[in-house]
Every structure is written in C-alpha cells, then in structure tokens.
Amino acid sequence: MSGPAGPGALALAVQLRLLGVRPRRRLLVHAALGGTGLHPGTLRAALTGVLGPRGTLVVPAFTPENSLTSSAHLARIAGLGEEEVAVFRSRMPPFDPERTPSQGMGALAEEVRTAPGAARSGHPQTSFAALGADARRICAGHRLESHLGEDSPLGKLCWEGGQVLMINVGFSSCTAFHLAEYRIPKPPLRMYDCVVKVNLPGGRRGNGHEGEWTRYEDVALDDGDFAEIGRAFPDSLVRRGKVGGAPAVLFSVADAVDHAQAWMTENRR
C-alpha cells in the first residue's frame, strides 16, 4: 500500500485535477472507500496537495447515535427493555469535539478529523472536520439549532463558493441538499435530543462521561428523496470522472442547493 507521500498520492492528484479540483478551493468531500482499494491517508494527501496551502478540505464528521430518535440510536437499543434503555442512555458518552469519533462517515472522514491541525465544528450531531487555510473559521460558530443550515459549515461553504466532491457515493448521501430544506417556504420543524460534554470546574478532564441531555428545535431533516433530486440535477452542472478507479462527481455547493430548493418547493408537500 502506498504511503501518503508515495506515487499513489501523485497519481490520485492527477485524477483530481482532471476532474476539476483546483488550488485554493473549499472542498467538501464524501467518500465511501470500501472495495475501492483507495487508502484514506493517501487520498487525504492527494486532496490537500491539490488544494494547496490556501485551500481547505472539509468532511462530514456526524455523530447520529447521539440522539433519542435517530435510526442509528434506535438500532442500538433495539430489543432492550425499558429499564435497559434507561441505563444505556444514562451511560451514553457526551459529544466531545476533540475525542468523539464520527459515526458511519467513512475512513476518509476519520483520517481528516484525526489529522494534525484539523478543526472540528461543535455540533453534537452534525459536526464537520476540516484541514487547511480556512479550517478553523469554517468550523467556528456552528449553532445547535442549525444542523445543516446557514449557521453551519455547510452554510459557509455555500456562500463562499465551495464545491462538493463525491467519490463512490450517490446523491442519496449529498449533504448539500439539506441546506435547501432550510430555504424552502415554512420548512417543517421537530425537536432533537443529544447529550453534550459538561466542562468541569478548574478545567479538569473527566472520564469522558460527564454530560447533560439537551433538547432543541430545528428543521426536520429528510433525505428520503435525495436520490430523486440527484437524478434531476442537470448534467451541465456536474463534472464526472474517476478517482483511483472509483466513480467521482464534482459540483458547486450553491448549484446543488439551488437545484434542491427548486425541486423541494415544487415536489414536497
């Protein structure tokens, strides 16, 4: 397996450039590396190499299990009795942006999250991790009531000309479409629950289980029609190619959000 500085990274860099990835860009990457033969460290090195010192690599670092109602959490408690569920929830570790691994986001997301110099936003369910020139600014100020809205890293990427690169991933996983849910007329709302880290007096570090449950209202996120929205995405707005033999697409965050907003406004009820 090639190391991060080996020819594997150089070959991937050529493919990324051919696809349209350019220096200085802010790039949100979704990647499913299973079965592709791609090494997450090599891919990270290729991405940051092409983006250069003034570019920024962003990945989703979500933690959907930190919830009372998500499908990920419900799968964890399936088959447990009422008392067992109560005990399980009382022992759930709170979200800590410095320690909590992402859940189900793939090897590249963890490679970026754990890289030296990486920043991570503070949302306990839909955080993002980033590397590069604008990493800390993009990850700052992620409001609890804005999972994937204007006051999230996704919102900043949209306003600042960011792009999305999806490697071996379909549009059903296109996070950018979620921002459109905040922009449609009168989006449905719902309550969310999560457990967050409590800062101990004197800056002491605890055992990782000091937390409190927090309840808040936000847009009711629904990706059930994202594959259909993706099929209607104009080909003229998407660049297609290969990265290490895996299918890849590149497009503008703003184009994706505008398209999804128009589609949702017309088709969602």
Image (cartoon, rainbow, N blue to C red):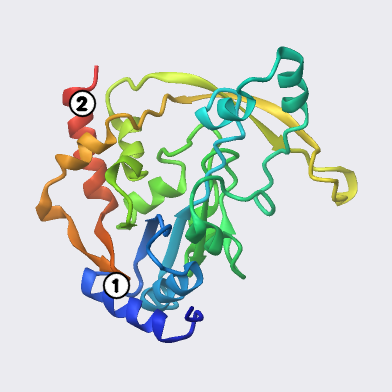
Picture coordinates of residue 81 (x, y %)? Answer: 70, 15
Above or below residue 240? Residue 140 is above
Horizontally, residue 121 falls left or right of residue 6, namely right
Quadrant in the rendering for residue 242:
bottom left
Q: What element carries label 1?
A: helix
Q: What residue type is labelled 1?
A: Leu
Tell me if mark 1 has few (under 14), some (14-19) or many (20+) residues whose alpha carbon lies within 10 angstroms of its own: many
Question: Toward the viewer: 241 or 251?
Answer: 241
Q: Give the residue at x 35% y 43%.
A: 173
Image-based side of 228 in relation to 139, left or right: left
- Residue pointed to by mark 1: 16
For the residue marked with disc 2, what is the amino acid? Thr
At x 72%, y 26%, the residue is 89
- From the viewer's perspective, tell me whether residue 146 is left or right of residue 203: left
Q: In terms of secondary structure, where does tag 2 sit? A: helix
Q: Name the residue under label 2.
A: 265
**Which mark identifies residue 26?**
none
Other residues around mark 2 within 10 Å, as few (<14) / some (14–19) / many (≥20):
some
Q: 63 above or below 119?
A: above
Measure the C-alpha gap from mark 2 to mark 1: 34 Å
- Label 2 or label 1, whichever lies nearer to me, is 1
* Residue 21 x %, y %: 28, 70
In this view, which residue lies farthest toward the top? 82
